[in-house]
C-alpha cells in the first residue's frame, strides 16, 4: 500500500527541525471536498491549510471558507514563495511564515519580520526562524517563542503543545 508518510528530524544541538514528507498516491483534497466538510457549522472551529504549488487555488479556498464560515479560525503554513502568498496574509487569521519567505520580503531577522508582517495580519502571525526559534505577534503584542521546557501556548482559547518552547516577551 502506497500511503503518505512524514518523518520529523529534530536537532537537540540547535533545536531546529526538518520535516520529510512523502505523499504516496494520496491526492490533495479538492475545493469542493473541503467546502463540503466546512459547511457543517458545528463540526470545525479551526481549519489549517497548507500553501502549496497551487497557491492561487488555496487563496480562493481560504476566501471561500471565510465567506461561508466567518466564525472559524483559519491558519495557513506559508513555507515557500508561491503565487498568492502575500494576499493570503490578509485573508487568514494566523499565517505561519517561514524564514525563507520573510527573507524574500526583505526581513533580516525575526523581530523585523514580526513587526513588518503584523501590518498585514488582523489577528496574529507566527514566524519560524530556524535555529533562532519562532516568534508570534498577536493583536495585543509581540511574543517570542524560545527553546526551554515543554509549555502550552494559547491563542483564542485553543491550546498548542509546542515541543521545547516557552513564551517570552521580545525586548
Image (cartoon, rainbow, N blue to C red):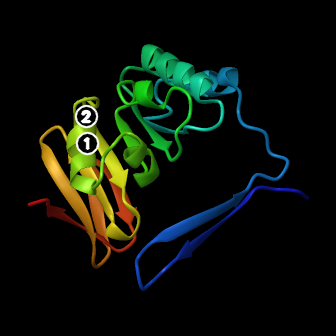
- Whether residue 6 is visible, yes or no, is yes
Q: Nearer the viewer, mark 1 or mark 2?
A: 2
Say which quadrant the N terminus sits in. Answer: bottom right
Give me the residue at 48% from left, 34% from top: 44
Q: Is residue 74 left or right of residue 126?
A: right
Indicate which disc, 1 or 2, sits on the residue closer to the N terminus: 2
Count the labels in the image. 2
Residue placed farthest to the left in the image? 171
- Whether residue 39 is visible, yes or no, is no
Position of residue 145 measured from the top left corner of the image (x, y, whole percent): 26, 63
Whether tag 1 and tag 2 are in contact, CB under 8 A, the answer is yes
Give me the residue at 8% from left, 60% from top: 171
Q: Secondary structure at mark 2?
A: loop
User: Which quadrant of the view contains residue 70?
Assistant: top left
Q: Is residue 39 above or below residue 17?
A: above
Numbered label attached to residue 156: 1
Position of residue 90 measured from the top left corner of the image (x, y, whole percent): 35, 25
Report the front residue among 124 and 18.
Answer: 18
User: Which quadrant of the view contains residue 149?
Assistant: bottom left
Q: Is residue 57 above or below residue 5?
A: above
Give me the residue at 56% from left, 22% from top: 61
Position of residue 155 measured from the top left corner of the image (x, y, whole percent): 27, 47
Q: Which residue is mark 2?
A: 123
Amino acid at each position: 500500500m502506497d500511503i503518505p508518510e512524514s518523518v520529523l528530524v529534530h536537532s537537540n544541538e540547535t533545536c531546529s527541525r526538518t520535516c520529510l514528507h512523502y505523499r504516496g498516491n494520496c491526492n490533495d483534497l479538492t475545493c469542493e471536498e473541503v467546502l463540503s466538510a466546512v459547511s457543517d457549522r458545528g463540526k470545525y472551529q479551526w481549519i489549517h491549510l497548507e500553501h502549496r504549488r497551487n497557491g492561487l487555488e488555496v487563496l480562493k479556498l481560504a476566501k471561500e471558507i471565510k465567506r461561508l464560515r466567518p466564525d472559524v479560525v483559519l491558519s495557513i503554513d506559508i513555507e515557500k514563495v508561491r503565487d498568492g502568498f502575500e494576499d493570503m496574509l490578509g485573508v487568514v487569521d494566523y499565517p505561519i511564515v517561514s524564514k525563507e519567505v520573510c527573507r524574500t520580503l526583505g526581513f533580516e531577522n525575526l523581530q523585523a519580520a514580526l513587526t513588518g508582517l503584523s501590518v498585514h495580519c488582523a489577528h496574529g502571525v507566527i514566524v519560524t526562524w530556524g535555529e533562532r526559534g519562532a516568534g508570534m505577534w498577536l493583536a495585543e503584542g509581540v511574543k517570542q517563542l524560545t527553546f526551554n521546557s515543554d509549555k502550552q501556548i494559547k491563542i483564542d482559547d485553543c491550546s498548542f503543545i509546542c515541543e521545547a518552547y516557552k513564551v517570552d516577551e521580545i525586548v
